[in-house]
Amino acid sequence: MKKIIFSVLLFPFFVFADDFYDCKFAKGDKGKNNLKYMRDGTVWVANDRFIAHDYIKNEYKSSKFTKFKDNLSIAEDSQYVYALANDRTNYAIASKTDSAIFQWSNCTLDLSVDFKNAKYGSKPVNFLPKIKSYFREVLKDPDSAKYSDVSKPQKDFMVEYKNVVTGYSV
């Protein structure tokens, strides 16, 4: 039996962010000096992790930073190793499964995004029946859906056409 895990966004995305950065994005191969700067990228930094987007809006979410070495914070999961310069000007991700390496550099703080004063709307109540109703409409076999460990709504955000949209997610 296949298990599918859904993350439901009752208006947008991830962890409550601290800062938003504009960066130059590059991609290359480990061990080869071939990083190619593509275009602009963005990074959102939370207290203990980051979310980065490349120029075609692929998203990379770091795990929680658990190692600290020199001027770097380091995190890893089964797929990637993530590094954050403590001055928040450079970010890197190295794949564990292939030779890909991604870099966001020359990052500057974007002061136009103010998460602390953003309008998130009212916190959703009675949200689980709404989620189940939605999936009853869109799934091919809605009776096979199982719901477990649904988190409480938390303040979150997403990027839509270069605009930050705030709200709550579960």
Image (cartoon, helix red, strand yellow):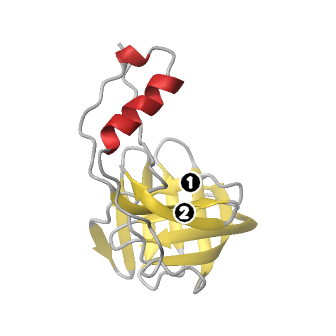
Residue in view at x 54 percent, y 63 percent:
52
Q: Position of residue 84 (x, y in %)?
A: 44, 72
Q: Position of residue 123 (x, y in %)?
A: 34, 60
Which residue was labeled with disc 1? 59
Q: Earlier in the sequence, mark 2 or mark 1?
A: 2
Q: Quadrant of the N terminus?
A: top left
Q: Position of residue 24 (x, y in %)?
A: 68, 73
Kindly check if marks 2 and 1 are in contact, taking CB atoms under 8 A apart as contact: yes
Residue type at numbered disc 1: Glu
Q: Which mark is residue 1?
A: none
Whole-number angstrom distance, CA of label 2 to CA of label 1: 6 Å
* Left or right: where 11 falls relative to 143: right
* Left or right: where 163 falls relative to 122: right
Count the numbered circles shown.
2
Residue in view at x 71 percent, y 54 percent:
56
Answer yes or no: is residue 113 visible. Answer: yes
Asked if 43 appears above or below 147 in the picture, the reply is below
Determine whether the residue tagged by mark 2 lies in a helix, strand or loop: strand
Q: Quadrant of residue 111?
A: bottom right
Residue toward you, 82 or 158 = 158
Neighbourhood count class around disc 2 (C-alpha, 10 Å): few under 14, some 14–19, many 20 upward = many
Asked if 159 appears above or below 95 in the picture, the reply is below
Q: Position of residue 91 (x, y in %)?
A: 52, 70
Asked if 50 appears above or below 57 in the picture, the reply is below
Answer yes or no: is residue 33 visible. Answer: no
Residue in view at x 45 percent, y 86 percent:
87
* Left or right: where 101 falls relative to 83: right
Residue type at numbered disc 2: Ala
Neighbourhood count class around disc 1 (C-alpha, 10 Å): few under 14, some 14–19, many 20 upward = few
Which residue was labeled with disc 2? 52
